[in-house]
């Protein structure tokens, strides 16, 4: 009998969380370029948040604090998709006129998918600990 490979849940959660973090930062860059968010020192808060999320994902892996940080970051990243779907819809007039609508929508939807996946894995790992 052949043994089936076992998937390491910690590695899957780490990769999903890092993917979500990268997509969230790409999305923020899109927001700044399209003037949906202001450019400036306010983005340093995002850098600090990203640093905490990165630390929780990589250094605090397999610890309750790491799961909580990853869960919080994932839920907030998923919330970005919900915010963009309110009002004018996923693509408002400024995004549609920019010519970058496809990349913008792709980034938001990919971020929402990876964020939801990370949130599920984080919550599952937290309650199993």
Image (tube, helix red, strand yellow):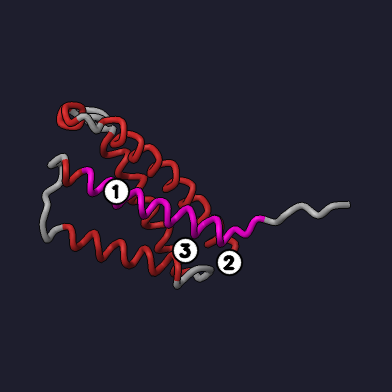
Nearer the camera: disc 3 or disc 2:
3
- Say which mark, if any, is on residue 67: 3
- Say which mark, if any, is on residue 119: none
Please determine whether, in this image, residue 19 is positioned above or below residue 97.
below
Please determine whether, in this image, residue 80 is positioned above or below residue 129.
above
Q: Is mark 1 on a helix, strand or loop?
A: helix
Q: Are marks 3 and 2 in contact (CB under 8 Å)?
A: yes
- Residue 32 position in % (x across, y down): 17, 46
As for residue 93 lying within the magenta part, the answer is no
- The residue indicated by pointer 2 is 129
Left or right of 114 on screen, residue 3: right
As for residue 11 lying within the magenta part, the answer is yes
- Residue 79 position in % (x across, y down): 32, 45
Q: Nearer the viewer, residue 113 or 100?
A: 100
Task: Characterize the magenta stretch by its predominant secondary structure.
Answer: helix
* The residue stretch that appears in magenta: 7-30
- The residue indicated by pointer 1 is 26
Marks 1 and 3, how far apart at CA = 23 Å
Residue at left offset 25%, top offset 28% = 89
């Amino acid at each position: 009998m052949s043994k089936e490979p076992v998937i390491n849940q910690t590695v899957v959660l780490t990769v999903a969380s890092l993917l979500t973090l990268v997509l969230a930062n790409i999305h923020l860059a899109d927001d700044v370029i399209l003037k949906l968010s202001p450019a400036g020192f306010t983005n340093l808060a995002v850098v600090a948040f990203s640093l905490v999320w990165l630390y929780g994902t990589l250094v605090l892996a397999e610890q309750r604090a790491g799961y909580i940080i990853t869960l919080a970051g994932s839920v907030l990243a998923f919330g970005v998709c919900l915010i963009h779907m309110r009002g004018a819809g996923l693509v408002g007039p400024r995004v549609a006129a920019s010519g970058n609508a496809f990349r913008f929508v792709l980034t938001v939807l990919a971020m929402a998918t990876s964020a939801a996946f990370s949130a599920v894995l984080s919550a599952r790992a937290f309650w199993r600990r």
